Image (spheres, rainbow, N blue to C red):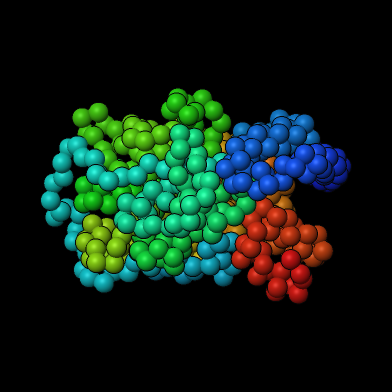
C-alpha cells in the first residue's frame, strides 16, 4: 500500500498548523473582544463546543492528508506459515513497559483456592441488576463515563461542588468530570487505557479492580448474576440509535444484565443510552478487538467471592496463558479475515505482556498480513508499538505513528514515535513529540518521565 512521503506530510502539517494557529488567534480575539471569555470558561459550554471544534479539526486534517485507509498497512515481513506459541507458565514483565502500564496494574491476588467454574451453581436465565446508573458521556468520554457508572453502583461519590455541570435534560455529570480530570484531562484525547481506569479505582475510590483478558459470555453472565457489573471494551460500529454503519472505533460499556431468552446483554451505554440491548453474538464479535478484556470493580469485603467466580483466572499469569490459548484457537478457527487478524493481534499482545517481544512481533506481522486490521485499533492498543520498539524495528514504529497522527488526540503515538526517533539519533525531534503528547494529555506521566530521563523540559 503506497503512502505519500511522511516527510511531506509533516511539512504540510506545519504549514497547516501555522494557518490553524492564525485562525485560532482570530477566533480567540473575537471571543475576548465580545466579552465571551467568561462563557468559554464554563465547562458545560466547552462540552457543547468541543465536538464541533473536533469535527473541524478532523475535516481540516482530511484536507491535509486526503482520505485515510480503513486498515493498517501490511507488514513488510512475509510469513511462510502461521506460527504457534507455547504457554509461558509464568508472567515476566517486558523490559520496556508499555506506556501507561509499567505493571499489569491489577491489585487482585489469589488469596484462596479458587473454586472450579464447573462446581459453581446454575444462574438464572434472565437477570438485571438493580441500582445500575446510566451516565451519558461528555465529548469523547466513554471511559470516564462508564467508570463513573460502575463506581456509583458501589457507592462511590465524587465532588459535591455544585457548578454548571448539566448535560442536556439537566443531567448532572460532575462525578464524571472528577474521573476525567485524572484519567483524561485533554478533551481531544481519544483513549483512556484499562490500566488508567483501574488505577483510578484502586488509588482514589477505595475499591478493588480486577482486569482480565480472554473472557467469554458465560463468565460475563456469571459475574452479573453474582451482583458484579462488568466493564468491557469492544469494537464499536453503532450510531446513537444503535444502528451499525459508522466507522470502526473502540468503546467501553457497562454490562448490568443479560437475557438468555432474547440472547442479549443489557448495557448502560454512555453513547447510546440506558438499558441498551446488544445481541450475544455481536458482543462476542466486537469484544475480540480488545482481547475479550473485562474489568470488575469490587469492595474489599467481596474479594474472596470474586476470586471464586474467576476460578483459575484469579491468577494473572494463568489468565494470560488462557488468553493466549484462546486467541490462538480463534486464529485457527475463524474464517473472517478481519476477525482472524484481530485474533492474531491478540496473540501478539498477550505474548508481549508475558515479556516475549520477539515472538510478539511475529504474531503482529501475521495480523497485519491480512490487510484488515482496523486502522483505529492503534488509537487504543499500543502493544504493537512497544513490541516493535523492543525488537529494534524503529522505522515500523515511526511509520505506524505517522499514520495515526493524521488524527488528533493520540498522545501514545507521539510517545512511541519519540522513543523510536531517539533510538535512531533524533533526540531533538523526539523531545518535540513528547511535548506534543503533553499537549494532548497534560501532566501525562510517561511523557514527563521520559523528558526527565533525557534532561529536557516539558
**Left or right side of 314 for 373:** right
Q: Residue at x 45, y 44 (%)?
A: 172
Compare residues 383 and 242 and report the one nearer the observer. Answer: 242
Q: Residue at x 24, y 67 (%)?
A: 301
Q: Is residue 327 above or below residue 388?
A: above
**Left or right side of 74 for 350:** left
Compare residues 242 and 311 and report the one nearer the observer. Answer: 242
Residue 27 x %, y %: 79, 39
Q: Can residue 61 be seen at all in this image of the molecule?
A: yes
Q: Residue at x 26, y 72 (%)?
A: 111
Q: Is residue 201 above or below residue 286?
A: below
Outermost residue to the front:
35
The answer to which image quadrant residue 68 occupies is: top right
**Left or right side of 92 for 442:** right
Residue 170 x %, y %: 45, 38
**Left or right side of 106 for 432:** right
Q: Quadrant of the N terminus?
A: top right
Report the label total: 0
Q: Residue at x 32, y 57 (%)?
A: 155
Compare residues 11 and 276 and report the one nearer the observer. Answer: 276
Q: Is residue 246 above or below residue 421?
A: above
Q: Quadrant of the C terminus?
A: bottom right
Residue 58 x %, y %: 69, 36
Q: Can residue 416 be seen at all in this image of the molecule?
A: no
Amino acid at each position: 500500500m503506497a503512502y505519500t512521503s511522511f516527510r511531506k506530510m509533516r511539512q504540510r502539517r506545519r504549514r497547516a498548523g501555522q494557518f490553524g494557529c492564525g485562525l485560532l488567534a482570530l477566533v480567540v480575539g473575537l471571543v475576548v473582544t465580545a466579552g465571551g471569555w467568561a462563557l468559554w470558561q464554563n465547562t458545560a459550554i466547552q462540552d457543547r463546543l468541543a465536538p464541533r471544534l473536533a469535527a473541524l479539526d478532523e475535516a481540516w486534517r482530511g484536507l491535509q492528508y486526503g482520505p485515510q485507509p480503513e486498515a493498517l498497512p501490511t507488514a513488510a515481513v512475509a510469513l511462510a506459515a502461521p506460527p504457534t506459541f507455547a504457554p509461558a507458565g509464568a508472567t515476566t514483565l517486558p523490559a520496556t513497559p508499555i506506556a501507561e502500564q509499567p505493571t499489569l496494574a491489577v491489585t487482585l491476588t489469589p488469596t484462596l483456592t479458587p473454586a472450579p467454574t464447573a462446581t459453581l451453581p446454575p444462574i438464572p436465565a434472565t437477570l438485571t441488576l438493580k441500582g445500575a446508573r446510566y451516565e451519558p458521556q461528555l465529548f469523547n468520554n466513554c471511559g470516564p463515563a462508564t467508570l463513573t457508572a460502575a463506581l456509583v453502583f458501589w457507592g462511590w461519590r465524587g465532588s459535591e461542588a455544585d457548578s454548571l455541570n448539566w448535560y442536556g435534560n439537566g443531567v448532572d455529570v460532575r462525578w464524571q468530570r472528577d474521573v476525567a480530570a485524572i484519567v483524561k484531562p485533554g478533551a481531544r484525547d481519544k483513549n483512556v487505557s484499562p490500566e488508567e481506569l483501574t488505577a483510578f479505582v484502586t488509588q482514589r475510590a477505595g475499591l478493588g479492580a480486577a482486569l482480565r483478558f480472554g473472557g467469554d459470555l458465560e463468565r460475563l453472565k456469571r459475574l452479573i448474576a453474582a451482583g458484579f457489573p462488568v466493564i468491557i471494551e469492544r469494537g464499536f460500529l453503532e450510531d446513537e440509535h444503535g444502528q451499525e454503519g459508522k466507522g470502526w472505533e473502540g468503546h467501553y460499556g457497562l454490562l448490568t444484565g443479560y437475557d438468555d431468552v432474547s440472547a442479549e446483554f443489557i448495557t448502560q451505554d454512555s453513547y447510546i443510552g440506558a438499558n441498551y440491548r446488544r445481541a450475544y453474538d455481536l458482543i462476542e464479535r466486537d469484544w475480540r478487538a480488545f482481547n475479550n478484556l473485562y474489568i470488575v470493580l469490587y469492595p474489599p469485603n467481596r474479594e474472596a467471592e470474586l476470586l471464586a467466580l474467576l476460578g483459575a483466572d484469579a491468577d494473572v499469569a494463568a489468565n494470560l496463558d488462557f488468553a493466549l490459548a484462546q486467541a490462538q484457537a480463534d486464529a485457527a478457527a475463524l474464517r473472517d479475515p478481519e476477525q482472524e487478524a484481530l485474533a492474531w493481534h491478540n496473540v501478539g499482545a498477550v505474548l508481549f505482556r508475558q515479556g516475549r517481544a520477539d515472538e510478539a512481533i511475529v504474531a503482529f506481522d501475521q495480523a497485519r498480513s491480512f490487510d484488515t486490521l482496523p486502522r483505529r485499533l492503534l488509537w487504543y492498543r499500543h502493544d504493537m508499538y512497544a513490541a516493535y520498539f523492543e525488537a529494534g524495528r524503529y522505522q515500523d514504529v515511526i511509520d505506524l505513528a505517522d499514520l495515526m497522527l493524521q488524527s488528533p488526540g493520540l498522545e501514545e503515538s507521539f510517545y512511541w514515535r519519540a522513543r523510536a526517533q531517539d533510538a535512531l539519533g533524533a533526540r531533538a525531534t523526539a523531545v518535540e513529540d513528547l511535548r506534543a503528547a503533553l499537549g494532548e494529555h497534560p501532566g501525562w506521566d510517561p511523557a514527563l518521565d521520559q523528558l526527565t530521563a533525557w534532561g529536557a523540559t516539558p
